[in-house]
């Protein structure tokens, strides 16, 4: 359902259920009576603007969805949404560029809520060189790029485990947000074929593994990464709230050495 057109009570109930909270629990957390909360969900009561925002805060509703809640309750949206190229976001954009450069020689990239590539540093460009040109046509989706047979998939040493990790993370994100585009992307990626003989995820993981690595067979040698995600703190713009910076940190010293050599030119790409 289009959340911008759904009644507020239905949006509230869906948000509460996604969070796994009872009416009583949410009422206690939001410091409102359980009866009033029930009336809000059934439409018997109309929320104030402050109540909409209080409930959204308790349920950690994303800013985009908070705007939809406000509109459903009859109020104007609170949070702006501008493209990253907008002059008003110049400070944030400069901070993003500095952050991406600071991570070199480790690859780092920025994506939107649908995993479309927004910016990247120089090491990422080297990895993109092994991808089919069709997959590099904007918008470049980094999850599609990593699992597609014409993308990085043939280079991924532990493709079974990495694929399971990507699909599980995407499924959680789609379930938590209710985003139809993420559900469609999950279905698309699930249907992508695996090379014959790809081992199951369980066969690739060791008992002492603390995270799922990304191991690539590249023209320069084997590169193994652990990934971390960074987000903007306390954003008040929808675009910034949905932006994530994914950093690929070297999982071993051999990878760190190769990346440094690529950076300083002693190893030719």
Image (cartoon, helix red, strand yellow):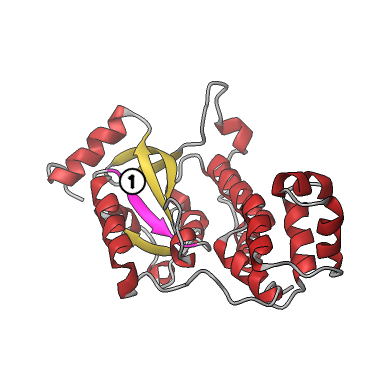
Query: According to the image, label 1 marks what residue?
Result: 218
Image coordinates of residue 29 in percent, x first then y, are: 71, 45
Q: Nearer the viewer, residue 111 or 41?
A: 41
For the magenta stretch, what is the residue range? 106-112
Image coordinates of residue 212 in percent, x first then y, are: 51, 36
Residue 46 relative to residue 90: left or right = right
Residue 109 relative to residue 1: left or right = left
Query: Badge 1, how many Cα within 10 Å: few under 14, some, many 20+?
Result: few
Residue 189 at least partly seen: yes
What residue is rendered at 78% in x and 70% in y? 46
Element under label 1? strand
Q: Nearer the viewer, residue 214 or 110?
A: 110
Image coordinates of residue 17 in percent, x first then y, are: 78, 53
Image coordinates of residue 165 in percent, x first then y, are: 57, 44
Q: Is residue 55 magenta?
A: no
What residue is rendered at 34% in x and 62% in y? 119
What residue is rendered at 64% in x and 71% in y? 70
The answer to whether 42 is drawn above or below residue 72 in the figure is above
What residue is rendered at 43% in x and 42% in y? 228
Residue 60 relative to residue 101: left or right = right
């Amino acid at each position: 359902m289009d959340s911008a057109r759904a009644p507020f009570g239905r949006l509230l109930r869906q948000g509460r259920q996604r969070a796994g909270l009872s009416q009583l629990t949410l009422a206690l957390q939001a410091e409102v009576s359980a009866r009033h909360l029930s009336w809000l969900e059934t439409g018997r009561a109309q929320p104030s603007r402050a109540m909409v925002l209080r409930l959204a805060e308790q349920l950690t509703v994303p800013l985009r969805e908070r705007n939809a809640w406000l509109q459903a309750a009859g109020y104007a949206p609170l949070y702006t949404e501008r493209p990253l190229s907008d002059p008003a976001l110049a400070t944030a954009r400069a901070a993003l560029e500095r952050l991406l450069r600071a991570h070199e020689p480790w690859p780092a990239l920025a994506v939107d809520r649908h995993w479309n590539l927004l910016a990247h540093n120089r090491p990422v460009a080297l990895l993109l060189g092994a991808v089919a040109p069709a997959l590099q046509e904007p918008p470049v989706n980094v999850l599609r790029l990593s699992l597609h047979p014409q993308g990085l998939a043939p280079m991924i040493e532990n493709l079974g485990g990495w694929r399971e990790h990507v699909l599980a993370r995407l499924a959680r994100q789609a379930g938590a947000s209710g985003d139809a585009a993420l559900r469609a992307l999950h279905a698309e990626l699930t249907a992508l074929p695996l090379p014959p003989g790809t081992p199951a995820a369980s066969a690739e993981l060791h008992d002492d593994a603390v995270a799922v690595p990304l191991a690539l067979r590249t023209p320069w040698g084997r590169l193994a990464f652990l990934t971390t995600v960074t987000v903007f703190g306390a954003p008040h713009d929808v675009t910034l709230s949905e932006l994530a910076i994914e950093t690929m940190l070297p999982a071993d010293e051999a990878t760190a050495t190769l990346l440094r050599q690529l950076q300083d030119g002693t190893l030719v790409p």
